[in-house]
Amino acid sequence: MIHRWPSPGKLNLFLYITGRRADGYHLLQTLFQFLDYGDQLTIEPVNTGVVRLLTPLPGVAAEDNLIVRAAELLRRHPLAAKNKFSRPGADIWLEKRLPMGGGLGGGSSNAATVLVALNNLWQCGLDNMELARLGLSLGADVPVFVRGRAAFAEGIGEILTPASPPEKWYLVAMPPVSVSTPVIFADPALKRDSPARSLETLLREPFQNVCEPIARKHFYEVEQHLSWLLEYAPSRLTGTGACVFAEFDTETDARQVLEQAPAWMHGFVTRGVNVSPLHDTLAGAN
Ligand SMILES: C[C@@](CO)(OP(=O)(O)O)[C@H](O)COP(=O)(O)OP(=O)(O)OC[C@H]1O[C@@H](n2ccc(N)nc2=O)[C@H](O)[C@@H]1O
Ligand SMILES: Nc1ncnc2c1ncn2[C@@H]1O[C@H](COP(=O)(O)OP(=O)(O)O)[C@@H](O)[C@H]1O
């Protein structure tokens, strides 16, 4: 049986850095919301003991692909041995819509979708907490996608408090550059001393992303896209970039601005959602 699973994008509605851990990782305070837009994974569970990704991503070796790494992690988990297949394996196809290095969390979301979907299809019986813990070893943003609730994240992204920000409409613009997260985090000018504040306080203040001035400085395309959007609506960088988003109260308003966009700007309009489309699918599968 072949199954289709959504792998949604995310936005960081705000992002502050409050310090660093001893290992150099940055301590964040960020608000995650999902997008009703993203990649699609088609998964066929098979009893071969082999995980295959049949749609390679240019520039990413299969063994480095977060889809394969997530599936292997679950396959080797002691509890996965108890699953319905004697030799759990999977054939996986990816329809990629989220730009890589876009700050929309595509790779992390792909990993989370594989963990949640294969846990269901192989009937491993791991709970979301255990899947999120497994996911954290693949990337800081995997746990929020596994848990599937909009959340205020602290630590390096793994301390999650569910949140319910307004579900606005967004015009997400995709500058044609891939921003590597370490490039932004390595810049000495990055503001790393924001005071740690409560979610209530942060929700009352104007939302900011401290990575934005760094991404604008390093990448002309980010500067160009953000400057254009700011003429029409409140707009910010997501994550460490490259994507930027403008927020609107209605879909019509967002679409009107996209229609006026210059030829060099590519983007899409979608709604922010506080429950991940992945979890809507999971609820339907059970
Ligand atoms: C900062 C965020 C906000 O969403 O940026 P985006 O990647 O979404 O743009 C993410 O948490 C990023 O998560 P992710 O992209 O998975 O980063 P990882 O692969 O875990 O880490 C890549 C590298 O970034 C640096 N890094 C990452 C996360 C963090 N809190 N502090 C760091 O200093 C480390 O040098 C690490 O080796
Ligand atoms: N399945 C995958 N989808 C996207 N990127 C992946 C995947 N597997 C590994 N990667 C690597 O992870 C990097 C970050 O990708 P992505 O999560 O899309 O960006 P971001 O973290 O900026 O949102 C990519 O540049 C790529 O090298």
Image (cartoon, rainbow, N blue to C red):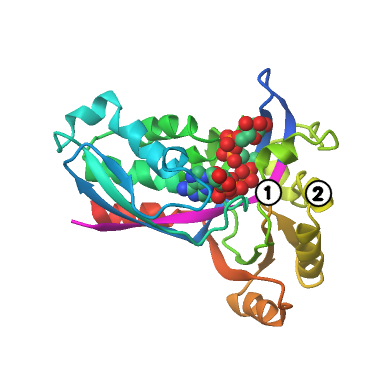
Q: Is residue 125 above or below residue 149?
A: above
* Badge 2 amino acid: His
Instruction: Please provide percent x and percent y for residue 218.
Output: 81, 49
* Badge 1 amino acid: Val
Q: Nearer the viewer, residue 74 or 132?
A: 74
User: What secondary structure is the stretch in magenta mostly built from?
Assistant: strand
Can residue 215 be seen here? The reply is: yes
Indicate which quadrant contains ligand 1. Answer: top right
CB under 8 Å between callouts 1 and 2?
Answer: yes
Q: First in sequence: mark 1 or mark 2?
A: 1
**Marker count (numbered):** 2
Q: Is residue 71 left or right of residue 24?
A: left
Farthest top residue in view: 22
Q: Is residue 63 left or right of residue 43?
A: right
For the record, the magenta segment spans: 1-15
On whether residue 185 falls in the magenta region, the answer is: no
Residue with the mark numbered 2: 218
Q: Is residue 104 left or right of residue 95?
A: right
Kindly report the distance in space between the C-alpha atoms of the residues bearing marks 1 and 2.
9 Å
Q: Secondary structure at mark 2?
A: helix
Residue with the mark numbered 1: 179
Q: Secondary structure at mark 1?
A: loop
Can residue 31 be seen here? The reply is: no
Tell me: is circle 1 under 8 Å from ligand 2.
yes
Structural crowding at the residue carrying mark 2, measured as other residues with C-alpha within 10 Å and reported as few (<14), some (14–19) or many (≥20): some
On whether residue 9 falls in the magenta region, the answer is: yes
Q: Is residue 126 left or right of residue 203?
A: left
Residue drawn where x is 71% and y is 77% of the image:
261
Task: Tell me, for residue 93, which label it has, or none.
Answer: none
